Amino acid sequence: MAKERTLAIIKPDAVGRGLTGEILKRIHEAGFQVIATKSMRLSKAEAEGFYAVHRQRPFFADLTDFMSSGKVVVLALEAENAIAKWRDTMGATDPAQAAPGTIRKEFGVNIQNNCTHGSDAPDTAAFELSFFFPSHDLL
Ligand code: CMP
C-alpha cells in the first residue's frame, strides 16, 4: 500500500498534564514518520473552523472551548495506512470504550478530554493537514 498522511493533535488536556513526550514516543514506536509539527494555542474561532463539521452537535461549544483552552501540538504523520493506523494507536473516541494499551485508554479523562485527535478519512485528512500546514511544510 502507498504511504498515506494524517493529521494528529495532542490536545490541551494531554499537553497540560505533561504527556507530550509519552505520546510522541508512542508515535515513533508505532512507525510513523513525522513530516511536520507545531506547538500552538488555537483561538476559539480557529477551533470552530477546524471542527466545523461538528457545529450542529450538542458538544460543539464545549469542544471548541476545550480545544482553545491551552496549547496543542499538531503533527502531520506519514505511514502506510496512516489514517487507520493512528486511529488504532489512539483508541476509541470515548476512553471508556478504548482498547487496552491505546493512548486514550491509558491517558484519556473522558469523551471530550481524550488526549488526541486524528483524521477519520482521506478527505478530512487533506482538509485538516491544509488547515494547519502550508503546502511547503508538507514536501
Ligand atoms: P475528536 O477525535 O477530536 O473528534 C471530535 C471531538 O469531539 C472528539 O474527539 C471529542 O474530543 C469531542 N466529543 C465530545 N463529546 C463527544 C461525543 N459525544 N461524541 C464524539 N465526540 C465528542
Image: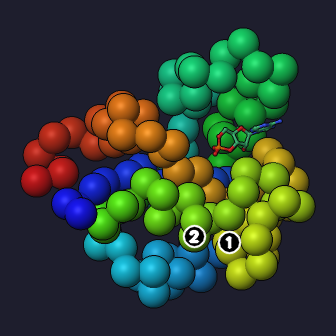
Q: Residue at x 73, y 51 (%)?
A: 93
Image height of 99 relative to 121, above or below: below
Residue that numbered label 2 is attached to: 89
> Can residue 76 be spotted in the picture?
no
What amino acid is found at the position of numbered circle 2 in the picture? Answer: Thr
Quick one: label 1, few (<14), some, or many (20+) residues within 10 Å? many
- Callout 2: 10 Å neighbours few (<14), some, many (20+)? some
Q: Is residue 54 above or below residue 69?
A: above
Residue drawn at (76%, 19%), measured in percent from left and top? Answer: 57
Counting residues from the N terminus, which is met first, the one under dot 1 or under dot 2? 2
Q: Element at badge 2? A: helix
Secondary structure at numbered mark 1: helix
Which residue is pictured at 77% across the width and 78% down the height? 100
Quadrant position of residue 131: top left
In which quadrant of the rendered view does residue 91 lie? bottom right
| The N terminus sits in image quarter | bottom left
Looking at mark 2, is its residue's CB closer than 8 Å to ligand 1? no
Q: Is residue 55 above or below residue 93?
A: above
- Asked whether residue 92 appears in the rendered view, the answer is yes
Depth check: 71 or 98 in front? 98
Residue 73 location, x and y as percent?
A: 49, 58
The mark found on residue 103 in the picture is 1
Q: Quadrant of ligand 1?
A: top right
Mark 1 vs mark 2: in front: 2
Nearer to us in this view, 2 or 16: 2
Any atom of ligand 1 within 8 Å of the CB at mark 1? Answer: no
Q: Do labels 1 and 2 touch, CB within 8 Å?
A: yes
Residue 83: percent from left, percent from top: 43, 54
Residue 102 falls left or right of residue 28 = right
